[in-house]
Amino acid sequence: MTTLDDIRDTAREILADGKGILAADESTGTITKRLEAVGVESTEENRRRFRDLLFTTKDVEQRLGGVILYDETVRQDALDGTSMVETLRRRGIVPGIKVDEGAKDLAGFPGEKVTEDLDGLRERFAEYRELGLRFAKWRTVTSVSDTLPTATAIELNAHVQARYAALAQEAGLLPIVEPESIMDGDHGIDRSAEVTEQVLAATVDALRRQRVALEGVLVKTNMVVSGYAGPDQAGPDEVADRTLAVLHRTVPAAVPGVVFLSGGQDDAQANANLDAIARRGPQPWTMSFSYARALQGRPMATWAGAEENVAAAQDAFATRLQLTGAATRGDWSEDAERAAS
């Protein structure tokens, strides 16, 4: 029987030695858009080939402690006939699973979303444990504007995050809670910080009220950045200071790790901001990355569905991991990023 100590060990294993998490958990709809943007038809086989390319990149285990999978990928085999889950396990990478089914419109609250679908989650968790998965992830999204979010949307999504996390721990899985504040829009960094703090505080409060052991949770969150369409864009130092200030006010030291999503940032911006955060020295939590587009975008474009491009695409993926790993340690440089582009 899996204990809380086992769940804590999973968190430590994922983030050991400066490693981070690859978010390879795009829904079929999301990855279809990304594949079609590089001229690749989104068939099940092409999705399998691309994810196999990532997971079999040489020395990927030196930078990745965990990979978040989509349900389709969990049930697929790698190109050598080994299951995708076993392919990761053999390389010492902890496999996990995205279990939310996407954000939906919140009835009565225009412009806001709620992530539901808790029905049957206990049974799904039991199956995923049998398939060899050790952690899970649930994402909620919060719109940011002068008038949004409402307290109702924050409260509902925090409640759902906590219910999911409680069920995950019951099943012996490490829950990653991902309450993302969406930085689309023209708002300034003050508004970003205000909303991110409200969302994280509500989520942690809900976790406590629903008796989730904080020692067995990872928090995945956005960095506090200016709205992407805003006229004044905060630089890495300000992003780092504002992000850490919010985290210190909301995330207890009992939480073993905080991992950042890249969101709408480009590759260099995501790493510059992560590097600035790391340079501020040790924090109460292990801090790392859980990137999707910032790690996969360039390899996908390099591959473009062609078998002869696999080696070059894997080199591109290895480079992205190397640069992001350097940012996690505070060793990233703009020159190295530019040389790799």
Image: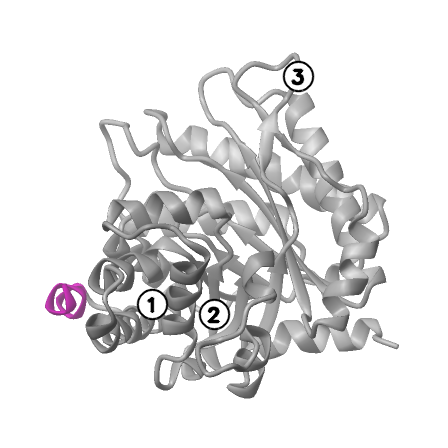
Question: Disc 1 on helix, strand or loop?
Answer: helix
Q: Which quarter of the rendering shows the C terminus? A: bottom left
In the depicted structure, whether residue 241 falls above or below residue 322:
above
- Residue highlighted by disc 2: 20
The reply to whether the C-beta atoms of the residues labelled 1 and 2 are less than 8 Å apart is yes
- Residue highlighted by disc 3: 107
Taking the magenta stretch, the answer to whether it contains residue 281 is no
Residue 143 is left or right of residue 188, and the answer is right
Question: Disc 2 on helix, strand or loop?
Answer: strand
Whole-angstrom CA distance, mark 1 to mark 2, is 9 Å
Whole-angstrom CA distance, mark 2 to mark 3, is 36 Å
Q: Nearer the viewer, mark 3 or mark 1?
A: 3
In the depicted structure, whether residue 195 falls above or below residue 210:
above
Residue 67, position as x, y percentages in the image: 52, 68
Whole-angstrom CA distance, mark 3 to mark 1, is 39 Å
Can see residue 263? no
Question: Disc 3 on helix, strand or loop?
Answer: loop
Q: Which quadrant would residue 333 be assigned to in this image?
A: bottom left
Instruction: Report the magenta residues as a range.
Output: 334-341
In the depicted structure, whether residue 155 falls above or below residue 74:
above
Residue 324's tag is 1
Within 10 Å of disc 2 (Cα), the crowding (few <14, some 14-19, many 20+) is: many
> Which colour assignment does the render follow?
one colour
